[in-house]
Amino acid sequence: MRPVVLAAAVLGAAHAAQGQELNPRAYVIAPVGTSAINLGYSHFDGNPDVAGAAPITDAEGSVDLAAFGYYRSVALLGRSANFALTIPYAVGDFTGIVADAPRHARRSGFADSSLRFSVNLIGGPAMDPNEFAKWQQDILLGVSLKIVAPTGQYDPTKLINWGTNRWAFKPEIGYSQRWNHWVLDGYAAVWFFTTNPEFFSYNQLFPGVRSKTQSPVTALEAHLSYDVRPRLWISLDANFWEGGETSVNGVPKVATYQRSSRVGITASIPLTAHHSIKVSYSDGAYVRYGGNYREIFASWQYGWLGWPASH
């Protein structure tokens, strides 16, 4: 077994749990014309918990991920809507025991980018800044679609890749309700995946072509947050997801079925009228294949109304 097998197992567990973010206040609306750019950094480390899906023991992974994001609030048929683009780049080190020998692998490159579009259905009409200043949130109900595109680093001859060589789609419904300083959020979603038509192919072990599929993943997410003062808030976060069994050339890999949960805490801190930072920490609460990692996250955001040239 080569060292790439170890790294692939770690990355495979991470890809399997793709998109299991903890994202409080995702359906809280903003005035039409609000824009923001953000630069984020995440550090992941832990045991991938491959549950016998690969011949690896004592596996550990450490990943540093940087991401650029852009957000824009718009109006759609009189309702508040928004879209957000994310482009990540990752560097990872992986260690473990393969065939009774210690192994190490390191990879760097762009991961798959994503685009999310969300629209409010109940409680959040499209508003200009003056209208928004007089508005008070009660119950919000919205829907979103997140699309993950196969833009990441991918070489079909290797097991270890930051990209997945497939598309992923996440339709979601989101609820948010405010009671004075408290905000409760709840989301329910399903991930759908297209086929990776060239999975670990054209090499000495598998000279032909192999395809890889993944069954849908059901995801639930909940957050309870408190406003300390305007734009300064802290949130307790939790999620749960289930499904995602993979198959290679039509043969199911039963050990890859997921049933996992994470818990965490998030804080958003304003610095100036336009600048803010967000920090969070999360860890696996219950893990059945993948997701058994710790994450430390920090991001800087600059927001404005209108377009930069007119501000």
Image (spheres, rainbow, N blue to C red):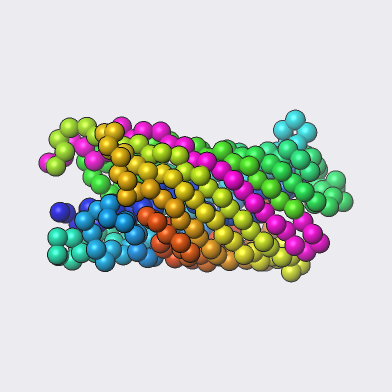
- Nearest the camera: 305 or 252? 252
**Residue 209, position as x, y percentages in the image:** 22, 32
Q: Residue furthest bottom?
A: 228
User: Is residue 291 at all visible to an observer of this figure?
Assistant: yes
Taking 285 as reference, is 253 left or right? left
Residue at the extreme left? 204
Q: Is residue 116 visible?
A: no
The residue that appears at 20% across and 64% down in the rendered structure is: 97
* Residue 25 part of the magenta segment: no
Q: Quadrant of the N terminus?
A: bottom left
Q: Along the horizontal axis of the image, is 213 left or right of 116?
A: left
> Which residue is painted at 77% across and 43% down in the image?
124
Say left or right for 70 vs 35.
left
Q: Position of residue 169 (x, y in %)?
A: 50, 37
Q: Which residues are magenta?
A: 178-204
Above or below residue 38? Residue 83 is above
Give the x, y percent position of residue 129. 81, 47
The residue located at (45%, 39%) in the rendering is 216
Nearer to me, 229 or 99: 99
Residue displayed at 58% across by 53% down: 221
| Above or below: residue 246 compared with residue 106 | above
Up the image or down, 89 lies above or below 72; here it is below
Tell me if residue 189 is in the magenta stretch.
yes
Give whichever of 299, 272 is nearer the camera. 299
Across and down, in percent, residue 259 comes to 44, 53
